[in-house]
């Protein structure tokens, strides 16, 4: 059994719950054991580092410091120094903190001063921070993944979407390429899917621009979805909770904004791995996505159970109901027609 | 001149790689610590360990031995012989009560001017931390008269008492 | 004091004097080193100038100096100059010592007081050492008049022809089946648009038939021993499986061979060849080679179609690799370059997007003898492009890949632009960061291409993609670039993209350099002796570098270098003998105990044990002077001239002279 320390990150417990569920479902088939870091906290996402460096790095490094406590063999399960982050933003932040604390000793000192308040300490370079797909492709290996496939995804036309945070700046030289990495392509191919070359695989999904500049985000999402559609893809596959949320949750709004009618579901690669390994869609969080993958998956013989459909988008020009009118007859209610 | 201790260091270079690295550092105007004075040999294999001892007893605080990278020796493999002697020499130094870190081996190819400069500066800092050797020097760091060299002037550094001398 | 020493401190203009107080150093040497025997110490603006040298010569004669110390630049630069000056004045040249206060002091330190103090230490070391110097005589060895030229590209061919025409023998070794090199792959040459084959082929034939040239193609040098004048080179002649005596070059074997192979070398992967092949019709020599990796007979044990059809029974499946030994006096390396692998710039999509081509691919595409008969078409083999983008500086001037400029890419890009325009009428865009057309008639060619209507966009291309954003981009390659003249981002849709890839050192340049005993720069090109004044010689006597092996360059420069190196070699040959440094080790038989510790240390087998006398002996012809045995001898019986124990110990003492202030930053 291969043991790793898991830093799940906040998204995995909320918007990307499906990612967490599907990841947990496939671990067993691949003989992997993830031990969650105890008492981990938010990595600060993409924003905090832009506001105040030392507290932001301290916030990140606290997780690394906690992880070092779990490095040593406990009860004979074998030790590890590898921290797995399934979320690209978390991965980038953890890797970044480790890298810069090592490169700039003065930063390391300040961060450790902050950590010392909680009785913690982190020596840069102690841990290996890696993303989930890195573990799957390079530790588990495509061969083993191929062996675990019982239901090949033959005929499922997918575009692999790596997102921008994973392959760059690549402090430890883990990826095949910075501009056009092929790890996700290779993995999906191992599952039997029909992988379409996707030139936008490392383009930005808009990140948090959906909150502060939706027009910009919509254009970025439109490019991704339009190109996938033009290439005949039935589905986008991603490794990043942020990418998944933006393309999924804002696709409808983007369609409204541009007057287009795209319908490209986006799933996590772990969900497709689960399907290929013969797991049930329900165990993999499939069906909760907003742009439904039901029809696409039906094409490869996967039936997605009916869950509560999300509320239909509100018609734009429908007015809001007026407050009840005041009447002399108390107790009687009347609404304006 | 500032109050900080300025070590004197003798550097041995080989004619083909490390001396040319030093030349390149010069041609490229790279700045490095001025404490090192170089001696050119044809090959690091020419380095007789007694040269190092003579330098240390003559007032040097450290000795830097440089040569071609393993496998790139102009004389095929003589730098490996320098490596062997270097490792033995470190044991001898330990036995003499001298910190073996005072002697450093650096491989630098003719193209590695930057490495030569960086290693030199780093070594000067390492020796600065170790402090004066005071072998053949007065306690204030001044050289003793020539007649003094080689007899009673060997001073054992306090830290060396704690080190285990290999049997 | 028996020695009379003169110390000369050079200003080197302001190179030394700007940082070191040279007058103080000279004054100090005269005062404080008097007890060592220093009788005169002078400083002078340029010691290496003829006036500076005369100064030394005059002092030697008039003051009767017996030793000279020159504090100036690195001995690698001017040691010889001052030794000759001493010799002219009647002093043995080995009694001169250089103290490097430029490369080791003034250029690397900034504080004047510190630099001056260090200079004094260096001078003190040199003075102490020079007292121990012994007069030596150079060793003269005869020069073998034969020359080895490695690499049969245009630079190597030029070198070989120059020497052969002067009447001396040349071994021309080429790794590929034919000579010609990269130039044979081109269609046109800039800026004159001469047909490349038309000007190259006659040279190839001349080299192939010259009575003074032994042409060894499909061969590689595997070992080099010896030294200038007397190299012993081992060449592996790979089995051709074609008997060169019998083959007439009729080409029937190639025609009948059933195995088609993608030609990655000559056709740059765009075309095919057979398993038995000559790379191109005008190949020199014209007899084919069999590619064992791909031959059906070697793979499956049957076929032999070539053998069956060969009219002269020249096919010989039993041929073996041969090792040839040749003796040569000088060696010219013309090993050329590798094209930068454009797949590394993944944002330009080469290898992923079919209609992105490299420069060598385009050379083949535009070549009338190439896979498309010179039709410039897309990778589908038929569609003519309506618009073409040419991207400059691919892999060059880019700190992610190579920092250097590959020299030829601008002109190459312009040549492509002209050819595309002329043959297809397509709209051509050149994407460049700087236009570098610095050579005779080069800028005129740029003007001509400008006038032809080629469009130029100045800016680094960010990416080439097939992800269309707008309707006019559908089905095209979009070049996303910054236009620094317009000050905006542009997306330019084109049908075809040509990457003007840079040049790189040969993938095995480092190993080759090691075999020949020369070094490579950080970029990997062979290092010349002096970047300006000695660009074809190397630090190793008798080894010369020409063409792109020394650095990226165009055809005229490669030819010029080829000829230049030949002149240097001819100069050596005509001198008939060469003087070697007398730096050797010798055994004092009186002191040798016969312990044989030194015997195993010499990698040149120069030390032999004489059992009768129970002593070891060193063969001076084989000794290379490294001094490892000198350091090892427990009895101190071995001494090394030029670097004796006495000299080095004296230098140590001098460097650590007691009344020097400690120096530091």
Image: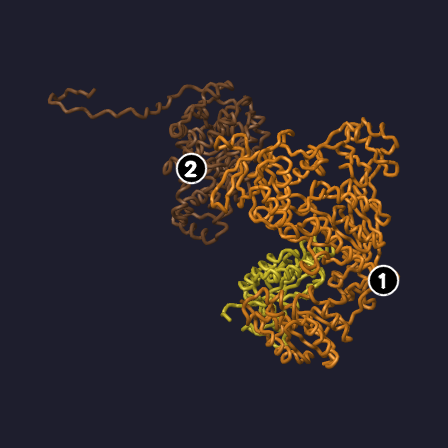
Chain colours: A brown, B yellow, C orange
Q: Residue placed farthest to the front in the image? A: C451
Q: Position of residue C351 (x, y in %)?
A: 61, 35
**Label 1 SS:** loop
- Give C168 or A77, whichever is nearer the viewer: C168
Q: Position of residue A140 (x, y in %)?
A: 56, 33
Q: Chain for mark 2?
A: A
Q: Position of residue C361 (x, y in %)?
A: 66, 37
Residue B47 in view: yes
Q: Position of residue A336 (x, y in %)?
A: 19, 21
Q: Check disc 1 and report the residue beneath it.
A: C614
Q: Is residue A76 above or below residue C96?
A: above
- Where residue A320 is drawn, which disc sits there? none
Quarter residue A332 falls in: top left
Q: Check disc 2 and report the residue beneath it.
A: A207
Marks 2 and 1, Cα distance to the nearest angstrom?
83 Å
Q: Residues within 10 Å of mark 1 (few under 14, many from 20)?
A: some
- Please state if C272 lies on the left or on the right of C216 as rendered: left
> Do discs 2 and 1 share a chain?
no
Q: Chain for mark 1?
A: C
**Label 2 SS:** loop
- Give C412 or B45, whichever is nearer the viewer: C412
- Please state if B67 lies on the left or on the right of C156 as rendered: left
Q: Is residue C54 above or below residue A202?
A: below
Residue C617 in view: no
Q: Is residue C199 above or below residue C474?
A: below
Q: Is residue C338 above or below residue C531?
A: above
Q: Mark 2 or mark 1: which is in front?
A: 2
Quarter residue A247 falls in: top left
């Amino acid at each position: 059994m291969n043991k790793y320390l898991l830093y799940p990150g906040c998204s995995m417990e909320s918007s990307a719950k499906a990612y967490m569920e599907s990841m947990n479902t496939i671990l067993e088939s691949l003989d992997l054991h993830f031990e969650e870091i105890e008492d981990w906290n938010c990595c600060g996402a993409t924003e905090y580092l832009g506001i105040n460096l030392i507290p932001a790095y301290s916030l990140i490094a606290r997780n690394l410091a906690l992880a070092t406590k779990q490095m040593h063999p406990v009860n004979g399960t074998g030790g590890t120094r590898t921290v797995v982050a399934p979320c690209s933003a978390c991965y980038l932040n953890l890797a970044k903190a480790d890298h810069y604390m090592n490169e700039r000793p003065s930063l390391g000192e300040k961060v450790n001063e902050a950590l010392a308040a909680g009785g913690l300490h982190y020596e840069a370079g102690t841990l290996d921070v890696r993303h989930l797909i890195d573990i799957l492709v390079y530790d588990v290996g495509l061969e083993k993944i191929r062996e675990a496939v019982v239901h090949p995804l033959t005929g499922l036309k997918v575009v692999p979407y790596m997102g921008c945070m994973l392959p760059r700046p690549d402090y430890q030289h883990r990826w095949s390429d910075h501009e056009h990495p092929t790890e996700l392509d290779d993995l999906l191919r191992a599952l039997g899917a029909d992988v379409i070359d996707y030139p936008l695989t490392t383009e930005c999904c808009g990140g948090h621009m959906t909150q502060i500049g939706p027009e910009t985000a919509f254009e970025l999402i439109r490019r991704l979805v339009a190109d996938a559609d033009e290439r005949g893809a039935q589905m986008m596959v991603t490794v990043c909770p942020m990418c998944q949320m933006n393309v999924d949750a804002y696709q409808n709004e983007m369609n409204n904004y541009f007057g287009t009618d795209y319908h490209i579901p986006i799933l996590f690669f772990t969900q497709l791995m689960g399907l290929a390994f013969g797991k049930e869609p329900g165990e993999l969080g499939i069906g909760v996505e907003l742009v439904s993958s039901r029809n696409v998956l039906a094409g490869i013989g996967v039936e997605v159970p009916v869950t509560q459909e999300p509320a239909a988008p509100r018609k734009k020009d429908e007015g809001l109901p007026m407050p009840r009118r005041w009447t002399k007859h108390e107790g009687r209610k009347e609404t304006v027609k | 001149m500032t109050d900080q201790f300025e070590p004197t260091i003798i550097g041995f270079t080989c004619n083909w790689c490390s001396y040319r690295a030093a030349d390149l550092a010069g041609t490229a105007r790279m700045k490095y610590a001025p404490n090192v004075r170089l001696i050119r040999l044809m090959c690091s294999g020419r380095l007789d360990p007694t040269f190092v001892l003579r330098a240390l007893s003559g007032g040097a605080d450290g000795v830097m031995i440089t040569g071609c990278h393993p496998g790139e020796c102009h004389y095929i493999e003589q730098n490996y012989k320098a490596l062997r002697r270097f490792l033995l020499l470190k044991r001898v130094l330990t036995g003499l009560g001298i910190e073996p870190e005072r002697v450093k081996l650096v491989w630098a190819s003719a193209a590695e001017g930057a490495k030569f400069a960086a290693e030199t500066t780093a070594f000067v800092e390492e020796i600065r931390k170790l402090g004066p050797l005071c072998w053949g020097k007065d306690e204030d760091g001044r050289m003793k008269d020539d007649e003094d060299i080689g007899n009673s002037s060997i001073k054992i550094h306090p830290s060396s008492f704690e080190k285990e001398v290999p049997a | 004091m028996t020695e009379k020493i003169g110390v000369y401190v050079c200003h080197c203009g302001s190179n030394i004097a700007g940082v070191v107080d040279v007058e103080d150093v000279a004054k100090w040497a005269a005062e404080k080193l008097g007890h060592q025997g220093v009788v005169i110490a002078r400083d002078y603006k340029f010691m290496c100038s003829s006036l500076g040298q005369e100064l030394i010569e005059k002092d030697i004669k008039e003051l009767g100096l017996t030793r000279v110390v020159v504090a100036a630049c690195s001995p690698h630069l001017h040691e010889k100059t001052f030794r000759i000056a001493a010799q002219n004045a009647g002093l043995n040249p080995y009694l001169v010592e250089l103290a490097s206060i430029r490369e080791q002091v003034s250029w690397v330190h900034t504080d004047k007081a510190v630099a001056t103090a260090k200079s004094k230490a260096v001078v003190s070391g040199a003075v102490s050492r020079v007292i121990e110097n012994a007069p030596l005589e150079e060793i003269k060895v005869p020069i073998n008049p034969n020359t080895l030229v490695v690499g049969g590209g245009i630079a190597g061919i030029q070198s070989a022809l120059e020497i052969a025409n002067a009447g001396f023998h040349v071994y021309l070794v080429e790794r590929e089946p034919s000579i010609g090199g990269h130039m044979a792959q081109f269609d046109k040459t800039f800026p004159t648009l001469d047909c490349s084959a038309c000007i190259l082929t006659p040279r190839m034939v001349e080299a192939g038939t010259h009575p003074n040239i032994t042409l060894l193609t499909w061969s590689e040098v595997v070992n080099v021993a010896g030294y200038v004048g007397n190299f012993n080179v081992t060449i592996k002649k790979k089995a051709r499986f074609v008997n060169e005596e019998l083959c007439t070059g009729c080409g029937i074997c190639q025609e009948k061979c059933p195995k088609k192979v993608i030609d990655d070398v000559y056709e740059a992967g765009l075309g095919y060849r057979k398993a038995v092949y000559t790379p191109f019709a005008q190949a020199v020599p014209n007899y084919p080679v069999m590619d064992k990796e791909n031959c059906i007979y070697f793979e499956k044990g049957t076929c032999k179609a070539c053998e069956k059809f060969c009219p002269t029974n020249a096919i010989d499946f039993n041929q073996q690799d041969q090792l040839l030994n040749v003796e040569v006096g000088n060696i010219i390396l013309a090993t050329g370059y590798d094209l930068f692998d454009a797949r590394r710039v993944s944002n330009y999509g080469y290898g992923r997007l079919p209609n992105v081509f490299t420069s060598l691919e385009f050379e083949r595409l535009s070549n009338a003898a190439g896979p498309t008969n010179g039709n410039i078409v897309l990778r589908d083999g038929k569609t003519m492009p309506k618009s073409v983008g040419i991207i400059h500086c691919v892999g060059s001037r880019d700190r992610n890949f190579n920092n250097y400029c590959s020299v030829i890419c601008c002109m190459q890009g312009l040549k492509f632009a002209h050819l595309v325009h002329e043959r297809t009428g397509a709209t051509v865009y050149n994407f460049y960061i700087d236009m570098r057309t610095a050579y005779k008639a080069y800028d005129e060619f740029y003007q001509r291409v400008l006038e032809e209507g080629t469009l130029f966009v100045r800016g680094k291309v960010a990416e080439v993609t097939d992800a269309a954003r707008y309707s006019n981009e559908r089905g095209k390659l979009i070049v996303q670039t910054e236009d620094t003249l317009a000050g905006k981002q542009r997306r330019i849709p084109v049908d075809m993209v040509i990457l003007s890839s840079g040049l790189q050192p040969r993938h095995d340049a480092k190993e080759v350099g090691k075999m020949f005993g020369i070094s490579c720069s950080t970029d990997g090109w062979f290092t010349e002796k002096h970047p300006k004044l000695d660009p074809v010689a190397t630090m190793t006597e008798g080894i010369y570098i020409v063409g792109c092996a020394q650095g990226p360059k165009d055809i005229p420069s490669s030819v010029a270098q080829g000829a230049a190196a030949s002149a240097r070699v001819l100069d050596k040959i005509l001198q008939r003998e060469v003087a070697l440094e007398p730096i050797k080790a010798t055994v004092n038989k009186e002191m040798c105990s016969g312990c044989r510790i030194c015997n195993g240390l010499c990698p040149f087998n120069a030390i032999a044990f004489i059992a009768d006398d129970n002593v070891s002996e060193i063969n001076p012809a084989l000794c290379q002077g490294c001094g490892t045995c000198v350091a090892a001898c427990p009895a101190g019986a071995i001494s090394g001239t030029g670097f004796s124990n006495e000299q080095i110990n004296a230098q140590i003492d001098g460097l650590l002279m007691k009344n020097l202030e400690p120096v530091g930053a």
